[in-house]
């Protein structure tokens, strides 16, 4: 009988390092076959972890957020669109309205869409732009916007496809904030000074070829194709086929269907064995997600008696995946930055987690006060609470009776952590320290040089800090 090991069972053996500072360590990596990240961190598709706020924050720091599927297709699509609209070089098909709507209607549209201006079109022709300055002191909000908008004759435009540097010159020269882009006289796009400033403020952000933030979206096995199609149309960069037990005939079938119908990367999981890795890769998976029961809100191992300790699971899956050049993402079981470093050293390309990012400002949900401390709720996707809330959301009404559902998860309170940006940067520093101790400049080099030593429970106890914190 083999022995399965997890993060607390091992340490990385320190090696001679050429790095003079941990900041020299390069943490760029691959998430899937065609998706690269500047930071190897991914927030999990959980209802209390990743919606658009988390996904935007993760992408800005160089990682990736995966929008959860525990809502309607329309709701998930809107979350993806919010990420895609948040930052980009060019806004394709920008929001445009006819000139006959009222100022009041235009204001409502801008508030709903979260924008500060509207392009005005008549048919396919751009005839003006409506901004907050146009109605700042206007008392009659029932006027048509045609009466107050800035007309086309006063607009500065550029050709669709204009280079970023050229667009910056035009914006600066004319002291304007919006630059409509035309193709054969028809409106095709929009560039704004605010979006360009965002590009320069987050230089390591994960972006698609159009400069938009990257975002992933999860699908299950019930409405897979319909949901995936809508998400891809909305701009999702990668689809996550998310099952508790993905080494199944149904998962293989869904991967083949997704790859046949869509030209998008598909990550599949969760799995924990080399055999599963081989089957899913041969079905067409562009990435694999590893983890059967390591999460603090997952009870799969207790309920079913099945699973593999996470470090061993990563190594087993990687042993096959690296032969095909397919990246592996370690999903769950990581409590500390050092655990993330161990997961990456074991062969994972990214760390995929809910618990690391739960409790932050960007995670959905309210801050809860209990006995003088602040918390946020963290629900396992297969927990009773998650199933109950999902039922209420779908039905649109409160469900008072207890549902008859099988659960493999729990709902807990986690410490409030503040902005996720600080969590991400702390994790990255821990990863870079681990790379430095392995004597590696890059993650692939770390994986080549890494040497693990198995430790006793006393060795792990010795590893932890002891004493009372000064703040207590």
Image (cartoon, rainbow, N blue to C red):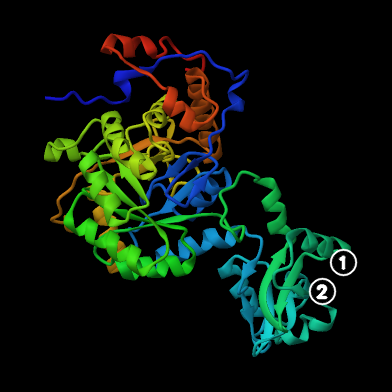
Q: Is residue 275 visible?
A: yes
Residue 101: where, in percent of width, then height?
A: 64, 86
Residue 155: where, in percent of width, then height?
A: 81, 77
Gap in Å between the C-alphas at discs 1 and 2?
8 Å
**Of the pair 164 and 34, the residue shown nearer to us:** 34
Q: Which residue is mark 2?
A: 156
Quarter-wise, where is residue 356 in the image? top left
Residue 312: where, in percent of width, then height?
A: 26, 29
- Is there CB contact under 8 Å for labels 1 and 2? yes
Residue 416: where, in percent of width, then height?
A: 45, 36
Assign a secondary structure to mark 2. Answer: loop
Q: Residue at x 26, y 34 (%)?
A: 316
Quarter-wise, where is residue 130 in the image? bottom right
- Left or right: where 252 falls relative to 404: right
**Of the pair 283 and 454, the residue shown nearer to us:** 283
- Position above or below: 227 against 56: below
Whichever of labels 1 and 2 marks the residue nearer the N terminus, that label is: 2
Assign a secondary structure to mark 1. Answer: loop
Q: Is residue 398 visible?
A: no
Q: Which residue is mark 1?
A: 174
Crowd rating for badge 1 (residues with CA inside 10 Å; few <14, some 14–19, many 20+): few
Mark number, residue 366: none
């Amino acid at each position: 009988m083999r022995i399965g090991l997890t993060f607390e069972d091992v340490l990385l053996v320190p090696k001679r390092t050429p790095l003079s500072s941990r900041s020299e360590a390069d943490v760029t990596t691959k998430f899937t076959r065609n998706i690269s990240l500047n930071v190897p961190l991914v927030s999990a598709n959980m209802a209390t972890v990743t919606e658009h706020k988390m996904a935007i924050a993760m992408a800005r720091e160089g990682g990736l957020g995966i929008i959860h599927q525990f809502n309607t297709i329309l709701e998930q699509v809107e979350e993806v669109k919010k990420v895609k609209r948040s930052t980009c070089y060019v806004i394709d098909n920008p929001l445009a309205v006819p000139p006959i709507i009222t100022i009041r209607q235009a204001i409502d549209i801008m508030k709903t869409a979260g924008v500060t201006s509207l392009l005005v079109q008549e048919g396919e022709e751009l005839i003006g732009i409506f901004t907050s300055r146009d109605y700042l002191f206007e008392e009659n909000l029932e006027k048509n916007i045609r009466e107050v908008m800035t007309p086309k004759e006063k607009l500065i435009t550029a050709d669709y496809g204009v280079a970023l540097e050229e667009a910056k010159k035009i914006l600066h020269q004319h002291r304007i904030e919006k630059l409509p882009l035309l193709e054969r006289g028809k409106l095709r796009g929009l560039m704004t000074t605010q979006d360009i400033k965002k590009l320069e403020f987050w230089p390591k952000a994960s972006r698609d070829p159009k400069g938009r933030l990257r975002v992933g979206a999860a699908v299950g096995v019930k409405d897979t194709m319909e949901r995936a199609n809508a998400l891809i149309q909305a701009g999702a960069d990668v689809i996550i086929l998310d099952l508790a037990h993905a080494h199944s005939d149904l998962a293989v079938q869904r991967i083949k269907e997704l790859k046949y119908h869509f030209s998008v990367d598909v990550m599949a999981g969760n799995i924990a064995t080399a055999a599963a890795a081989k089957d899913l890769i041969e079905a067409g998976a562009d990435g694999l997600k590893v983890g059967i029961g390591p999460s603090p809100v997952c009870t799969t191992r207790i309920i079913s008696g099945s699973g593999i300790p996470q470090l061993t699971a990563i190594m087993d899956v990687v042993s096959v995946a690296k032969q095909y050049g397919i990246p592996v993402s370690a999903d769950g079981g990581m409590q500390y930055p050092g655990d993330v470093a161990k997961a990456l050293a074991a062969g994972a390309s990214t760390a995929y987690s809910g618990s690391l990012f739960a409790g932050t400002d960007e995670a959905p949900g309210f801050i809860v006060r209990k006995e003088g401390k602040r918390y946020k709720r963290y629900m396992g996707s297969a927990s009773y609470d998650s199933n109950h809330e999902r039922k209420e959301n779908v039905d649109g009404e409160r469900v008072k009776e207890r549902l008859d559902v099988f659960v493999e998860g729990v709902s807990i309170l986690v410490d409030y952590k503040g902005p996720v940006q600080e969590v991400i940067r702390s994790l990255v520093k821990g990863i870079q320290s681990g790379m430095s101790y392995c004597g590696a400049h890059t993650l692939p080099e770390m994986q080549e040089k890494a040497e693990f030593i198995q430790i006793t429970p006393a060795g792990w106890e010795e590893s932890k800090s002891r004493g009372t914190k000064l703040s207590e």
